[in-house]
Image (cartoon, coloured by chain):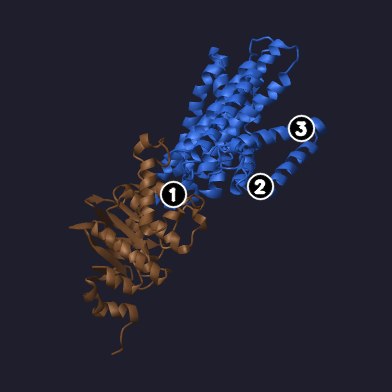
Chain colours: A brown, B blue
Amino acid sequence: MALLEVHGLRKAFGGLQAVNGCTFNVEQGSITALIGPNGAGKTTVLNLISGILKPDKGRIVFDGHHIQRRPPHQITHRGMNRTFQISLNLEDMTVLENMAVLSPVGGMRGLFRPDISKAERERALELLAFVGIAHLAHEVTRNLSYGQKKLLDFASLLMADPKLILLDEPAGGVNPALLEKIIDRVRQLNDQGITFLIVEHNMEMVMSTCNQVVVMAYGTVIAEGTPQSIQNNQTVLEAYLGKVAS
Amino acid sequence: MTSVPVSAQEQPLVRSKLKSKHSILGLIILLLFLFPLTQLITANNLNYYLHLMLFIFMYIAMASSWNILGGYAGYISLGHNVFFAVGGYFSSYLLLRDGYSPFFTAPIAGFVAMALAFLVGFITLRVRGPAFIISTIALVLVFRIRLDNWERLGGANGLKLPLIDLPVEQIKFPFYYGMLILAIITVYTSYRIRHSKFGLGLRAISQNETKAEASGIPTSFYKIFAFAISGYFVGVAGAMWGYYLTYITPSIFLLILVGAQMVLMCILGGRGTVAGPVIGAIIMIGTNEFFLSEFGSSELNIFGTGAILAAVLLFFPEGIVGSLRKIGRLPAILDWD
């Protein structure tokens, strides 16, 4: 069953058709990679799915609900959560507060309950320990290193108990040891039933971690399948390396 | 700021410190409540001090109220004096027409201001940064023109209100207590918001709105709601202030300077902190009054206040409370966050 269905998605920025009829599915329980050369429209697709941009045309069905006209916070409440390419954190707030922001408020009545409840604090510390930065819980986020911020980004998503996690270039600018750690955590969470959609350039990560690959070029999907089938796909090679003159 | 986990032997110390902080603040409030009564016993005329203090209380309330939107959510409004005017005009009009005391209509005046804030916020909170600031200035100008030409409300000449019927040594009492209670309620509300999910969301918005929205915070609703709450207390203050002055005109409320005053107090004390607006209001009005009495109503007093403001911000770039917290020198008595 597809957890996320993207159908005929189109988005133009002025005269530039960034996404041009993009269609693909993300299966429940999979780790799906979204790859493609620079400018293929991957990040735009991610922004459309998470509601930060509104599509000109097309539909996005998540968990049985049409979400293409929904604001981002409602999509988050439905169980989809994302990281950003350059990790966005609330720089002047503590790591713990960054975690607590993701915790569901629970409607109007929840608005005026304490900002970080005891249960939330414990959950947050648990998740921070899961990615290995629990000792930084009371640090102001500004003081964290690039890698630590990425880990925080990742851990904070889990506060909302998402069904689907979108990662925008989790391996970008990350050293091999840290990447190993991120891959390991993604696998563990996937075993627990969380579905992943990952935009990534690091082929090593894609081929070793993902079980579905969607390839985009020029705003549209040019190939879909298992990592093995993609590796041998002629269209994909051409999109990345250019056509061989014949 | 979240509390750092404390070890077992530290805990009683923290608790007793907290207790003593609460009792000191309680004592100050009690003294403030008793202070006017000394006028009844002794022959001293304290009316000048009562005036000065109720003026400070009013600005504590207004600056704290402004801080809910401008400090926590980071949306600078230079148009909060519109709510001040709306509160003032609403209660004054009811007083003149039906004889209802503004002390009873003030809470309602606050709701009228709140309703206006909802309406305005719905439109203007779609934009951020400078565009939002300009929209709030525009709001002031629109209201100024409207009120200047609204004959039923006296136009540019305003309305003259009856003096409250009390002997001279008690005439400031209702206003003093009204403003004091308003200030306490406002600061307490601000404190509660600061420590709630709502406050956390507002602070997230001030840091990064896209991230806040993607984190599941309905940012538009939060901002509009914050704008409305922050309009409420300013409206209540306006209702009492008009009655206190015994006349209201558009030029009392609707000067850019009046709106800027709240902003400056928050910046001086520390934007986004609970105690900041309180400290800011006290220092600002205190220095202004000092220079006014030293130099008279010349340009020198404005220069003096400006010089103090500049000097403080040079050494405390994040406001007094904000900067002191950052270097860990904030006295416990001022740590309300």
Tag 3 or tag 2, which sits nearer the N-term? Answer: 3
Return the chain for callout 1.
A
- Hey, which quadrant is residue B269 in on the image? top right
Q: CA distance from mark 2 to mark 3?
A: 22 Å
List the single residue furthest toward the bottom.
A246
Return the chain for callout 3.
B
Image point 54% across, 23% down: which residue? B90
Image point 77% across, 41% down: which residue? B303
> Residue A213, percent across and down?
26, 69
Crowding near pointer 2: few (<14 within 10 Å), some, many (20+)?
some
Q: CB of mark 2 within 8 Å of CB of mark 3?
A: no
**Closer to the camera in the image, B265 or A187:** A187
> Residue B292, percent across and down?
77, 32
Q: Nearer the viewer, mark 2 or mark 3?
A: 2
Crowding near pointer 3: few (<14 within 10 Å), some, many (20+)?
some
Circle 1 residue: A96
Circle 2 residue: B316
Which amino acid lies under the numbered mark 2 shown in the image of this protein?
A: Phe
> Residue A33, percent across and down?
29, 67
Image point 66% across, 37% down: which residue? B257
Q: Nearer the viewer, mark 3 or mark 1?
A: 1
Circle 3 residue: B290
Residue B120 in view in this figure = no
Q: Is B80 on the left or on the right of A242, as rendered?
A: right
Give the quarter of the figure containing the N terminus of chain A.
Answer: bottom left
List the single residue furthest toward the left.
A1
Which amino acid lies under the numbered mark 3 shown in the image of this protein?
A: Phe
Which amino acid lies under the numbered mark 1 shown in the image of this protein?
A: Leu
Residue B278 in view in this figure = yes
Q: SS class of the residue under badge 3?
A: helix
